[in-house]
Amino acid sequence: MHVTSPVREPLIQGGKTYADVTEDICRHVEGAPTKEWKIAFGISLVVLAYGSVCLAWTWWEGLGVWGLNKTVGWAWDITNFVWWVGIGHAGTLISAILLLFRQKWRTSINRAAEAMTIFAVICAASFILMHMGRPWMAYWALPLPNVFGSLWVNFNSPLVWDVFAISTYFSVSLVFWYIGLIPDLATIRDRATSKISRLMYGTFAMGWDGSAKTWARYEYISLILAGLSTPLVLSVHTIVSMDFATSVIPGWHTTIFPPYFVAGAIFSGFAMVQNLMLITRVVYRLEDYITLEHIETMNKVITLTGSVVGVAYITEFFIAWYSGVEYEYYAFFNRMTGPYWWAYWAMMTCNVISPQLFWSRKLRRSITFTFFISVVVNIGMWFERFVIIVTSLHRDYIPSSWAMFSPTMYDIGDYIFSFGLFFTLFLLFSKYLPVVNMAEVKAVIRSTSANLPKKIAGVAKVRQQGTAEPAFNKDSE
Amino acid sequence: MAELTGKYLVGVYDDDDTVLHAVPRLRKAGVKIQEVYSPFPIHGLDEALGHPRTRIGIAAFMFGVTGCCVALTLMIWTMGIDWPMIIGGKDPISIPNYIPITFELTVLFTAFGMVTTFFISNGLSPAAHNHKRFDVRSTDNKFVMAIDMGRNSMSEDEISRVLRDSGAEEVNIKQF
């Protein structure tokens, strides 16, 4: 039957039973909002309101309120877009790729990470709308029959690919997340005491009853969705990188971009997951579910992807010199020693050096240090996009048009808007939906929890009573 | 999901291993099991119950093929036939440039088609929110086995004895 190596720590600690899991996770959904939650939500709403005012003025007045000039035509808007999309890669990576790799530790964090993904993609999409300047014409990006003759969108353009990639990624992630939520919504529905919550959770649980037939199909479609989402998550940042790589701007026109962007996306996404989970586990007392093992494993992923990013930076720099193309060489030399040297070195320090500190077991198991490094990584990844976008543009071929970019309060305000939006959505999620996937955690408890010996004994007793050996292999999963 | 009617015997187990071992035992004793309800998936349970393997994968593949065809047709027709344009010196119909969107739409159609099929085949819909249930604890920590008395020739006492012998901690009667 179940065999767990004694050297591995159980994924879920505290000897939880199935009922304990339900109780621990449902408690915060069912109770009234705590004072801390109300304060945090209030702050998020204020931030969102301030950001909305800035955004409203941006749209009312036009993009001239940003600090853009005719040399630097893309700056914070696209930096923020790429940054948020990158963050939005961790959730689907955790739920899809780690599902295919049978990494069971993902079960405690996949729900919150997927929610984070969805909210991060919403924030990213808001920058797409912002930088259009006239968001009411956003539908022009879609291949719709129109009144200007039968002129269609240009399917050769990576910007159009991006429209399809981001919207597919968003909707498929949403479906994956919702499918995972249904069994847990049913649990809440069956515990609900008030009529309104029974109706609300019941409607979204759609009559889920957990029959063996439903579960078999559920597991099957989860696996296919994971198989679909794995190339999808890689394709999204690949296509985002092609927005740059298919142009001929020195510093952008490189073939290394897709893998380099994808690694960076996973790197920053995991850092954001760490930030959110470290707070969530304390606020909702989930220390038994999100253990030091989970934190350490995520830190290992951060170190791996951080190293990939570091190698990419160095390769890119080497190739710029080795290619012998003077414009390419200048673009990189200028990043390092030009007027934006501080952004470049902030990026190098935060992204290349800081994750290497996790080679120390003591540091990667330290919660305070993990939180600090996660923040540092996110700052570094923001600077990476800023360096790629602004320093490649600000000194173009004609020295007379060289310029610097400085953000106005509307650049900053629109960025603040995305934070307000993100935290408002995340707080609503963490209050009204279960932050840990109860059904999946119960399934991992079965094979890894501390009460395992008791369970094996129970099965042995049934067998002694003369049960026929089942004609299937249970552990063939 | 067919509407539940008639009289059912409901065996409640408190462990997934027990219920998994109970299924072949009951079937051997000649009991026809309607269904088993659990708070999480139990591997091998559907096979033990004799449920046929799901064919939802075939549906998913067909949706994927549809998505792929829709994407290619859309791009070839708009870019190559309806308004041919040479952009960046490429042919109006340049298949390599169509690969990203073809991939995305294939994934989109597969995911949505498959999930819709899943909802329909399991009778899941917002309208089904007050569906009849055997035991609500089956979404918490209990494993619930339902036996349709109308489909079994054995007597109620006999079946409930087999249920208890197989490890059920409760045997209830449910009349719909």
Image (cartoon, coloured by chain):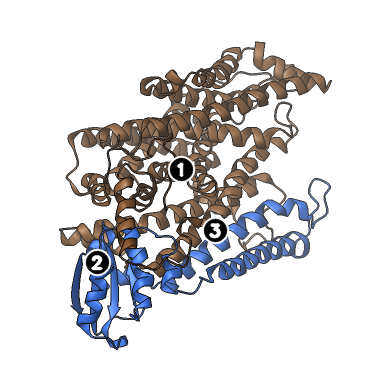
Chain colours: A brown, B blue
How crowded is the residue under tag 3: few (<14 C-alpha within 10 Å), some, or many (20+)? many
Q: Secondary structure at mark 1?
A: helix
Of pointers 1 and 3, the one earlier in the residue sequence = 1
Q: Amino acid at mark 1?
A: Thr
Of B139 and B24, the residue lying toward us: B24
Instruction: Determine which residue is flagged by label 2.
Output: B168
Residue at the image point whose x is 79% and y is 58% from the top: B93
- Asked whether residue A12 appears in the rendered view, the answer is yes
Comparing marks 2 and 3, which lies closer to the viewer?
A: 2
Task: Report how far apart the C-alphas of labels 2 and 3 lie in the structure.
Answer: 35 Å
* Quarter of the figure that contains the N terminus of chain B: bottom left
Name the front one of labels 1 and 3: 3
Residue A449, placed above or below residue B137: above
On the image, the x and y values in percent for residue A444 come to 39, 48
Q: Mark 2 belongs to which subunit?
A: B
From the viewer's perspective, tell me whether residue A286 is left or right of residue A417.
left
Specify the quadrant of the image occupied by residue A398. Answer: top right
Q: Which of the 4 quarters of the picture holds residue A33?
A: top left
Front-most of A323 and B176?
B176
The percent position of residue B120, horizontal first and vertical second, equals 43, 73
The image quarter in which residue B162 lies: bottom left
To the question of a shared chain for discs 1 and 3, the answer is yes
The residue depicted at 62 percent of the width and 30 percent of the height is A73
Circle 1 Cα neighbour tier, 10 Å, few/some/many (<14 / 14–19 / ≥20): many
- Relative to A50, residue A470 above or below: below
Q: Which residue is mark 1?
A: A117
Q: Secondary structure at mark 3?
A: helix
In this figure, which residue is indicated by the disc labeled 3? A224
